[in-house]
Image (cartoon, helix red, strand yellow):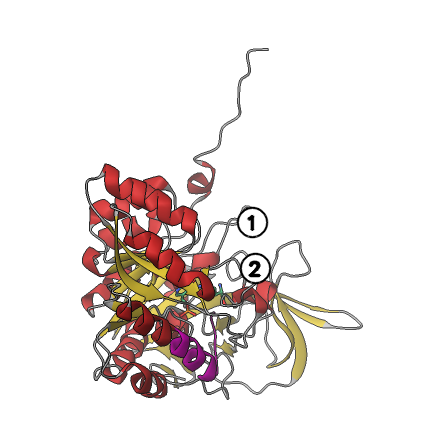
Amino acid sequence: MHNSYQYRDGEFYVEDVPVRKIAESAGTPCYIYSYAVLRDAFLSYRDAFSGIDTLLCYSVKANSNLAILNAFAGLGAGFDIVSMGELIRVKRAGGDLSKVLFSGVGKTEEEMRAAIEAGILFFNVESVEELRLLNKVGLELGTKAPVALRVNPDIDPKTHPYISTGFKKSKFGIEIGRAVEVYEEAGSMEGIRVTAIDAHIGSQIFELTPFVDSLTKLVNLADDLIDKGVNIEYIDIGGGLGISYKMDEIPPNPKEYADVIAGLVGGKPYKLVLEPGRSLVGNAGMLVTKVLFLKEGTAKKFVIVDAAMNDLIRPAFYESYHEILTVSGPAKAVEKVDVVGPICESGDFLAKDRKFPRVKSGDLLAVMSAGAYGFAMSSNYNTRPRAPEVLVKGGEFRVVRKRETYDDMLSGESIPEFGG
Ligand code: LLP
């Protein structure tokens, strides 16, 4: 665990602020992020890749709060976006639009136009139809849209099937075997300027071999394309580096990752682009929740808390594990429990059959490693307002997103009056 998380005098701290103090001020459930942890994650990437000409584009979908984007912009990051909404966020956060990549299998014409007008670095194009539409938009705007083709290298990233994206059978990218042909078509389009090659094989990847296999295929393709006279200035290898969710897990660090990559792209004529999301923010966030009730059945004991699957869907969706710490000092795990939320679904759990300390109503718990795909995937299911987000920097904290109100939640709805 990063040294910004510590127990001091029996209290859990984020940097120099007691978690209890934030929970009392912002209420629970609430997300808390540490600036120091995300900064260190970014710097460890930057230092690891300092020997290679690299652009680090933070993948906005992992955590798109304006304060987080602004923090990364301040550290010099570019951004990997997948929607108009994310483009607007990056603009509002003060991000450098010339360092933005636009990924995703289903971009709309409106999104393409806005991104070209914003002057982004390039689009990661995922199909021939998308390429043709982008060409049309480029022509209409009297410009050439900068393009990478996202190729699908058919690699098993050895992670959860829902977050594996580089298989032949997955919906992502253009089959690598067809890439040259599609690059040739792109080269003949007046509204397109080919500039790069891209792949992204999945997320929460713990082994370096899949990255090496994917990059090897990309490098071979890039070299082949360059021989054919295609302009390849960047090679974008996507995101996907895993993080530790369990205390004893040791993911590959950016330095090991950079070393194997340097072996493959060192001396090549193109720049490297990375799109990390989780590994920049995952360990920088926690979800703080309060124990509401304890319930002891004959078969199970439940700790019922005020955060639910609408706040953090990862355990329900991917059966993922998040460490849960007691805020009022470290405590020994003594009994097996399920930590569950108030939502009317059996899938609404934060931990299952977890060896847990004895807790009581009113206790605060910190669900760790919730900085990536936590708030970003939250919803209003069961008409629950989304939790506030708080950013800590040193001894200070600020609410960077207010808790939603009931009026916020209902503001777009109306009861219709029909003529008949
Ligand atoms: N680039 C592309 C094109 C992506 O699709 C993604 C993530 C990334 C970069 C960033 O990957 P990362 O470095 O964060 O692994 N909701 C899931 C993860 C979904 C990942 C989607 N794509 C989860 O909670 O585990």
Image quadrant, ligand 1: bottom left
Residue 32 position (above or below residue 417): below
Q: Nearer the viewer, residue 41 or 305?
A: 41
Q: Which residue is mark 1?
A: 381
Q: Residue at x 31, y 40 (%)?
A: 136
In percent of width and height, residue 266 lies at: 25, 84
Camera sees residue 156: yes
Residue 420's label in the rendered image is none
Contact, mark 1 vs mark 2 (Cβ under 8 Å): yes
Question: What is the three-letter code of the residue carrying label 2?
Answer: Met
Q: Residues within 10 Å of mark 2 (few under 14, many from 20)?
A: many
Camera sees residue 34: no
In percent of width and height, residue 86 lies at: 33, 52
In percent of width and height, residue 394 lies at: 25, 75
In the image as oriented, which residue stretches furthest toward the front? 228
Residue 208 position (above or below residue 273): below
- Which SS class for mark 2? loop
Residue 309's label in the rendered image is 2
* The residue stretch that appears in magenta: 202-217
Q: Is residue 214 magenta?
A: yes
Compared across the picture, whether 307 is left or right of 125 comes to: right
Q: Residues within 10 Å of mark 1 (few under 14, many from 20)?
A: some
Q: Nearer the viewer, residue 40 or 300?
A: 40
Question: What is the three-letter code of the residue carrying label 1?
Answer: Tyr
Distance from the alpha carbon under mark 1 to that under mark 2: 8 Å
Q: Nearer the viewer, residue 370 or 32?
A: 370
Q: Residue at x 46, y 76 (%)?
A: 327
Would the CB of label 2 be found within 8 Å of ligand 1? Answer: no
In percent of width and height, residue 175 lies at: 47, 62
Q: Which badge, 1 or 2, comes first in the chain's sequence?
A: 2
